[in-house]
Image (cartoon, rainbow, N blue to C red):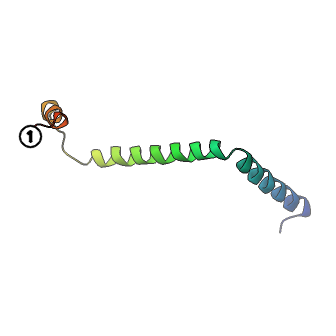
Amino acid sequence: MATASAKILKKAIKEAFVESFQENRDFFQEIIAEVLEDAGLLRAMNEGRKTKLVPREKLSELLKGKK
């Protein structure tokens, strides 16, 4: 069972977080975008570990549009 002071502290923290989010919306959007990009990169790296390696020459040809 939470004490009265614990409830007050919890409410104050929630209010501070909401106020901070509202005042710094762009900052939080940048953080979320970075996290999503990092998660996508990590997923791609993990998927890449499951595939065979491609020789450098073949990769270079693919990037130049040669078949």
Between 38 and 27, the one lying in front of the other is 27
Task: Specify the farthest residue to the bottom.
Answer: 1
Mark 1, secondary structure of its residue: loop
Residue 34 image offset from top left, x and y in percent: 52, 42
Q: Amino acid at mark 1?
A: Lys
Q: Residue at x 75, y 54 (%)?
A: 18
Lateral position of residue 13 relative to residue 50, left or right: right
Between 19 and 14, the one lying in front of the other is 19
Residue 6 image offset from top left, x and y in percent: 86, 59
Residue 58 image offset from top left, x and y in percent: 13, 35
What is the total number of numbered labels drawn onto the structure image? 1
Residues packed near mark 1 inside 10 Å, few (<14), some (14 to 19) or many (20 plus): few
Residue 45 in the image: above or below residue 10 = above
**Which residue, given by chain and number where applicable, does mark 1 sit on?**
67
Image quadrant for the C terminus?
A: top left
Lateral position of residue 35 relative to residue 6, left or right: left
Q: Residue at x 79, y 50 (%)?
A: 16
Residue 21 image offset from top left, x and y in percent: 71, 49
Between 16 and 4, the one lying in front of the other is 16
Task: Specify the farthest residue to the left.
Answer: 67
Task: Specify the farthest residue to the right.
Answer: 4
Image quadrant for the N terminus?
A: bottom right
